[in-house]
Amino acid sequence: MTQDIIARCEARGLRMTDQRRIVARVVGEAEDHPDVEELYARAAKLDPRISLATVYRTVKLFEEAGILERLEFGDGRARYEDADRDHHDHLIDVATGEVIEFVDPEIEALQERIAARLGYQLIGHRLELLGRKKT
């Protein structure tokens, strides 16, 4: 995944410095939805010289280039994931902050039907469900 992110950055004309490569690696290895501070903590383990400001600038650059997708889960922190991943939706546990990725064919079909009924062709969507685990 890391090499794929680096290749996409280079294809978009981004100059890939060593520190940008580290951020790309951290993003590529992420199995969660980290915010910039978490990306920085992971990057600093690989290169203690990397600064928080560098990670912020790199994440912004990657977002503007369409490499990263910014996610807002209602907790006041922007989180990020690879923009080139297969489509999925999110269920966010409001008590713990856990983010569960899922795909449901029924929901996908329903969204298509709603768009068609309103006279639109659906070209994309983002669905984030907020919930609390049943006890």
Image (cartoon, rainbow, N blue to C red):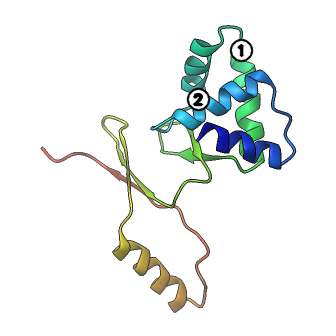
In this orientation, which residue lies closer to the viewer: 7 or 96? 7
Look at the numbered disc 1 and give the secondary structure of its residue: loop
Left or right: residue 101 compared with residue 66:
left
Q: Amino acid at mark 2?
A: Val
Q: CA distance from mark 1 to mark 2?
A: 14 Å
At 12% across and 43% down in the image, what residue appears? Answer: 135
Q: Decide: is 30 above or below 52.
A: below
Q: Decide: is 46 above or below 115.
A: above
Percent x, y for residue 128?
44, 56
The circle drawn on residue 26 is: 2
Q: Quadrant of residue 10?
A: top right
Percent x, y for residue 126?
52, 61
At 49% across and 39% down in the image, what residue appears? Answer: 33
The circle drawn on residue 51 is: 1
Q: Amino acid at mark 1?
A: Ser
**Cβ–Cβ under 8 Å for marks 1 and 2:** no
Mark 2 Cα-neighbour bin, 10 Å: few <14, some 14–19, many ≥20: many
Left or right: residue 82 compared with residue 31:
right
Mark 1 Cα-neighbour bin, 10 Å: few <14, some 14–19, many ≥20: some
Left or right: residue 106 compared with residue 41:
left
Numbered disc in front, either 1 or 2:
2
At 58% across and 23% down in the image, what residue appears? Answer: 37
